[in-house]
């Protein structure tokens, strides 16, 4: 049955991108790192994923590359996932519960992301075919934010990749995404003429440009794409302003963060939301130059359930929010590891976006140049800001 999407503006983009999931190994960091790499790249980019990189703190992320898609048996009884086709807007906030943390959790009563609604595309080529379940708040906030973008800029389409498996738990290609509160979305893109085009998970350079290289041996079939900062920022802003979902983190490469902040100023976004974006964004060990990863805090009702756990950082607005909800902010003030100098990032052994880490003899010139440039933003130091903490 078709849910009530009448309030969502119509005009979704047609046309699927021929792509295949690709997943590089983890460069693990228990709290903030996510090893999604490219999620939607042309077949010709496919490469052997190689061995997993070591986890910096020995957390669970180190072994995700070996984890089965279904993950370990949950330590607690979980409510079954809601059936595909469920309208998330009709559910009670307690319909789902995020159990545990992003890197060690499960999902009780998982809510499927609706597919093929105007303004939102649930990517069928996502890294994990069943990875479209989230908490009710996560799913609803995505639907709402995509609708806002499409209402203001008709023809917009948000492409959503992995959230979590139907009951959460370990999920291939990710360190986190275990408790229904993490999501990967592709950047909104436009073509050379500024027209919206279907999103594809290719790395974007400091000007927001990227290429769908297709055959790496030939430059003749390259398609140039560009970050659609207007739409992408509007989406991020809608997520940050969502009253039901509290965004804790936005993982994104530094130079795209800069472009989005510039766009936020251009759109004269309220100072408060720009500050929220500034403080919640960071570049993890993996650059996240081909997608955005958003993480939500536990909701008040999940915290009352007693099984949802958050970790640092904790912001003043979040403390105030918890106090208003009658919850003790100390409940989630736990920090998983001592603060201190962070080890330098391991140089990337391979590129995300399906690009190899080093040029190959048959690679055409533009791809080689792009790859060399990419190295400059893939390794520290960056623009004076630290990695995610
Ligand atoms: Zn992710």
Image (tube, rainbow, N blue to C red):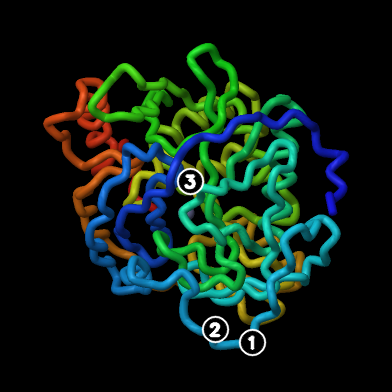
SS under mark 3 = strand
Q: Where is residue 203 in the image (x, y as percent from the top left)?
A: 38, 35
Residue 133 vs 237, above or below: the answer is below
Residue 34 point in image, percent of width and height:
41, 57
Q: Which of marks 2 and 3 is nearer the N terminus?
A: 2
Total numbered labels placed on residues in the image? 3
- Label 1, label 2: how far apart the Cα atoms are: 7 Å
In the rendered structure, which disc, 3 or 1, sits on the residue that comes first in sequence?
1
- Camera-side residue: 92 or 237? 92
The answer to whether residue 345 is seen in the rendering is yes
Position of 82 relative to 261 (above/below): below
* Disc 2, SS: loop
Residue identifier under label 3: 281
- Whether the residue carrying mark 1 lies under 8 Å from ligand 1 is answered with no
Task: Indicate which label's residue lies in the foreground, 2 or 3.
Answer: 2
Pointer 2 residue: 74
Report the residue at 64% width, 87% height from top.
Answer: 77
Q: Which of 124 and 153 is in front in this view?
A: 124
- The image quarter containing residue 27 is bottom left
Residue 221 in picture, x, y percent from top left: 36, 20
Left or right of residue 54: residue 322: right
Would you identify the image quadrant in which residue 130 lies?
Answer: bottom right
> Camera-side residue: 382 or 213?
213
Residue at numbered disc 1: 77
Q: Residue at x 40, y 35 (%)?
A: 202
Badge nearest the viewer, 3 or 1: 1
């Amino acid at each position: 049955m078709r849910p009530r999407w009448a309030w969502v503006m119509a005009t979704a983009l047609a046309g699927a991108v021929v792509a295949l999931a690709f997943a590089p190994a983890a460069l693990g960091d228990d709290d903030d790192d996510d090893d999604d790499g490219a999620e939607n790249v042309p077949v010709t980019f496919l490469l052997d994923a190689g061995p997993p990189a070591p986890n910096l703190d020995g957390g669970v992320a180190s072994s995700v590359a070996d984890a089965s898609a279904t993950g370990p048996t949950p330590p607690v009884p979980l409510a079954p996932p809601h059936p595909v086709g469920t309208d998330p807007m009709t559910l009670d906030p307690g319909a789902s519960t995020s159990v545990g943390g992003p890197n060690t959790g499960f999902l009780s009563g998982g809510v499927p992301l609706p597919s093929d609604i105007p303004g939102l595309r649930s990517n069928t080529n996502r890294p994990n075919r069943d990875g479209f379940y989230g908490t009710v708040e996560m799913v609803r906030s995505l639907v709402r934010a995509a609708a806002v973008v499409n209402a203001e800029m008709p023809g917009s389409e948000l492409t959503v990749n992995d959230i979590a498996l139907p009951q959460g738990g370990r999920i291939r290609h990710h360190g986190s995404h275990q408790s229904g509160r993490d999501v990967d979305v592709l950047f909104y893109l436009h073509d050379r003429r500024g027209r919206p085009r279907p999103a594809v998970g290719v790395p974007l350079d400091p000007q927001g440009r990227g290429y769908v290289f297709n055959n790496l041996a030939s430059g003749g079939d390259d398609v140039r794409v560009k970050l659609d900062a207007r739409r992408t920022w509007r989406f991020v802003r809608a997520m940050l302003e969502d009253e039901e979902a509290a965004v804790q983190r936005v993982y994104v490469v530094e130079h795209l963060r800069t472009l989005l902040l510039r766009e936020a100023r251009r759109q004269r976004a309220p100072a408060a939301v720009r500050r929220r974006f500034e403080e919640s964004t960071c570049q993890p060990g993996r650059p996240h130059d081909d997608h955005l990863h958003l993480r939500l805090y536990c909701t008040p009702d999940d915290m009352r359930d007693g099984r949802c756990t958050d970790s640092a950082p904790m912001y003043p607005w979040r403390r105030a929010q918890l106090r208003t909800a009658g919850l003790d902010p100390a409940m989630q003030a736990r920090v998983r590891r001592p603060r201190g100098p962070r080890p330098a990032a391991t140089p990337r052994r391979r590129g995300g976006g399906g690009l190899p880490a080093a040029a190959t003899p048959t690679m055409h010139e533009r791809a080689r140049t792009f790859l060399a440039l990419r190295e400059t933003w893939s390794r520290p130091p960056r623009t004076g800001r630290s990695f995610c903490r």
